[in-house]
Amino acid sequence: MIAGLVLAAGEGRRFGSAKQLAPLHGRPLLEHVVAAMASAPLDEVVVVLGARAEEVRAGVDVGGARVVVAEDWMDGQSASLRHGVAAVPDAEAVVVALGDQPFLSPGAVEAVLAARGEGADAVRATYGGVPGHPIVLERSLFAAVRELRGDEGARSLLRDARPVPCDGLGRPDDVDTPEDLDSAVS
């Protein structure tokens, strides 16, 4: 089983409100990422919420995705990742996407999945040579994920990740501020 994890537990401090709910092209920002993951060749999609979990859950249609809540979301992105991996104990690998990257494409997910294989415990999309998301973490890294702390997510596990060019397969834009959202709309 290959599971998709959408990490969306942050409080959106720089955004000033629950950015997961910010409207983009007629629907909440988070719905764009969940829809892309749901359209990709994944067996299950898990959305990890934290700050304002009930408000976000009420305002976002996650379709058939399962929602888990990282009560310790204040510990940073690693808390979200730990909760996501714990929610899929039988997965052979997880594809990780960030809930504030609304231009993720199912094609990028397919590309990183296609690059899995011998000698690659981690696979990472690149855009213009710059590392981005989605990433794939194989089961062999799950124990290390459980030990992660802080707001760096899986960065320490991605040093030797196999790069997969995803140019032309969506965009890696993060929406961290209202200005980022304005730029995304235009």
Image: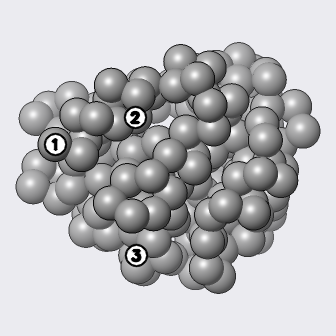
Based on the displayed image, in which of its 4 quarters is residue 179 positioned?
Answer: top left
Which of the pair 108/115 is nearer the observer?
108
Question: Which residue in the protein does label 3 denote?
Answer: 40
Among the two numbered marks 1 and 2 on one chain, the one whose residue lies closer to the N terminus: 2
Asked if residue 7 lies left or right of residue 23, the reply is: right
The disc, 3 or 1, on the residue closer to the chain's N-terminal end is 3
- Spot occupied by residue 22 in the image (x, y as percentages of width and height): 50, 46
Instruction: Look at 78% across and 41% down and name the residue there.
Output: 52
Circle 2 sits in a helix, a strand or a loop, which is it?
A: loop
Q: CA distance from mark 3 to mark 1?
A: 26 Å
Name the spot of residue 81 as percent of width and height, x first: 68, 41
Crowd band around label 3 with a 10 angstrom C-alpha radius: few (<14), some (14–19), many (20+) = some
Q: Position of residue 86 (x, y in %)?
A: 81, 53
Label 1 with label 2: CB-CB less than 8 Å: no
Q: Write down the residue under mark 1.
A: 186
Q: Is residue 124 left or right of residue 129?
A: right
